[in-house]
Image (cartoon, rainbow, N blue to C red):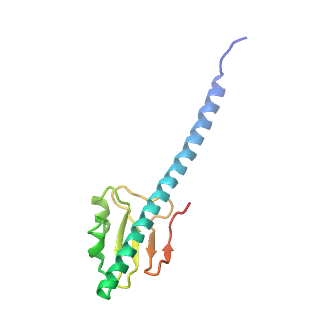
């Protein structure tokens, strides 16, 4: 009696391992995207707190560039996302105090899921838009 595996058994094992690796890689990408979304929500929360402080002192909300660029976050166009490798969102704030994070798509940063999405946080603390949660 010969010992060892047949070619068919080896092929089946390789196919099963390939399928499991593919599923694992997709789940890994979703976990990364959830982490990036959580970072965007944290940055929006910080911008909201800064907007509220600014309003108390000046009776109006700050412009986009005042806090966003001071914090080192990308703002404005998608080209800013391209030059900033550590961020996956670009941020903006409106005159009503609402700040939003738009998912970057340039510079090899395609999101998992929707092709482009944004998250907004109003001055009242209402979170809207598409975001990943745990």
Residue found farthest to the right: 1
Give the percent coordinates (x, y) of residue 12.
Answer: 64, 32
Task: Please tell me which residue lies in front, 86 or 43.
Answer: 43
* Residue 5 visible in the snapshot: yes
Residue 61 seen anywhere in this rendered image of the structure: no
Does residue 124 lie above or below 17 as drawn? below
| Above or below, comparing residue 10 to residue 52 in the picture | above
State the residue at coordinates (32%, 80%).
Answer: 54
Please identify the quarter of the rendering in which residue 43 is found.
Answer: bottom left
Residue visible at 40% across and 79% down? 98
Q: In this rendered view, identify the residue nearer to me: 109 or 63.
A: 63
Where does the image place residue 100, in percent across and percent down from the top left?
A: 40, 74
Image location (x, y in percent) of residue 55? 34, 84
The residue drawn where x is 57% and y is 38% is 18
Taking 80 as reference, is 23 left or right? right
Is the residue 85 above or below the residue 96 in the image? above
The location of residue 85, given as percent across then percent down, is 32, 55
Q: Is residue 16 left or right of residue 49?
A: right
Q: Is 11 or 4 nearer to us in this picture?
A: 4
């Amino acid at each position: 009696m010969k010992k060892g595996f047949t070619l068919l058994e080896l092929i089946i094992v390789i196919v099963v391992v390939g399928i499991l690796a593919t599923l694992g890689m997709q789940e890994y990408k979703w976990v990364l995207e959830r982490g990036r979304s959580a970072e965007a929500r944290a940055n929006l929360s910080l911008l909201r707190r800064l907007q509220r402080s600014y309003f108390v002192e000046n009776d109006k909300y700050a412009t986009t560039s005042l806090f966003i660029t001071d914090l080192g976050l990308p703002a404005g166009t998608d080209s800013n996302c391209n030059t900033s490798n550590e961020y996956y969102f670009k941020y903006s704030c409106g005159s009503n105090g609402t700040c939003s994070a738009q998912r970057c798509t340039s510079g090899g940063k395609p999101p998992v899921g929707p092709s482009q999405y944004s998250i907004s946080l109003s001055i009242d603390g209402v979170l809207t838009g598409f975001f990943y949660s745990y």
